[in-house]
Structure formats: C-alpha cells, structure tokens
Amino acid sequence: MTFAPLIETQTDLERAWRALMNPLGWTRTSTWLMLVGPDSVPLPSLTEIEDCAGPPPEDGADQLGGMLAQLRAEALPEGSRVAFLRSRPGSGHADDEDRAWAGMLYAAARVAGLPAEVVHLATDVDVLALPMDEAALPVGT
C-alpha cells in the first residue's frame, strides 16, 4: 500500500512525517526528502540521505540545490515543492546543529528554485517543526 496524504497545510505535513517516521528511534543521522506535486500529493518515493551527522558541509546548499534543480527541470511538474526532515538519535529540542542543517536545507531549496515546506526534525521521542525563522541560515543567503 502507498502512503499518499494531501499536504496542504503545515499540520498535514507534520502528520505525514509522523506517519512515515514511526516508530521513532534512530541509530544514525539522516536527512529525508519528500517531493510534493502541484496537486498536494507527495510523489511516491521518499529519499534518505545518510551520514548527516556533524555540521552541514559548506557547499551543501549548492550541491543539494543543484541536484534538486536538475530534478525540477527534468522530471518535476510545475508547481512542485520539497519537504525535508532531519532524523537523529537523542531527545529534546532542536540544537545548533539541527538549526544549521535546517538553514542549509532551506538554502538548497532556494538554489533549486523550489518552494520549501517547513523543515522538520525527528528525534527518538518526537517530530517537531524547524521554521525558517529558527534556522541558522548560511552566510550569503
């Protein structure tokens, strides 16, 4: 069975991430990428980018943004958007590293020319939003 909710609001997105990421509990840190079509239905694949521990790479926004721009140009319908989630072991609220990753992910979406949904964080105990005003945006963005 395919999970195909409508993503029309922040609440819809958080509900989708909660469904997709359960059960919570992580052994490594990853970034998850969900593409949402212009009809507000997520595309049928979810991409995991592994080895995302530590601070984001300095060229991360350009690298990821370039890949997303190519995907947008070659395969995505006009009006598509991107949603990101960072998953990591541990509990508690977002830390400086989580905020740095969120900032890099927002910047990557800008590089790609794709609207970005609110970035989310999944820890061992919860899924929470990392809105842009809480993200540590890379210099020059």
Image (tube, rainbow, N blue to C red):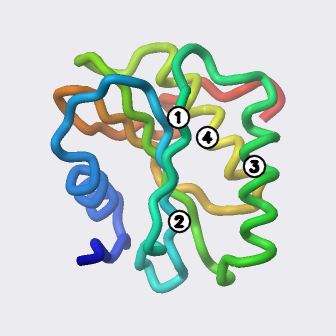
Local secondary structure at mark 2: strand
* Three-letter amino acid code at the position of disc 3: Gly
Point out the tag, 2 or 4, that comes first from the N-terminus: 2
Residue 139: quadrant of the picture: top right
Query: Could you tell me residue 15's position as x and y percent?
Result: 23, 57
Disc 2 marks which residue?
A: 35
Whether residues under marks 1 and 2 lie with C-beta atoms below 8 angstroms apart, the answer is no
Query: Could you tell me residue 132's position as x and y percent?
Result: 53, 39
- The residue mark sitting in front, 2 or 4, is 2
Whether residues under marks 4 and 3 lie with C-beta atoms below 8 angstroms apart, the answer is no
Residue 130: quadrant of the picture: top left
- The residue mark sitting in front, 4 or 1, is 1
Residue 50 is labelled as: 1
Point out the tag, 3 or 2, that comes first from the N-terminus: 2
Point out the tag, 1 or 3, that comes first from the N-terminus: 1
* Three-letter amino acid code at the position of disc 2: Leu
Point out the tag, 4 or 1, that comes first from the N-terminus: 1
Left or right, residue 35 beside residue 66: left
* Three-letter amino acid code at the position of disc 4: Leu
- The residue mark sitting in front, 1 or 3, is 1
Disc 3 marks which residue?
A: 65
Residue drawn at (64%, 23%) of the image:
56
Residue 127: quadrant of the picture: top left
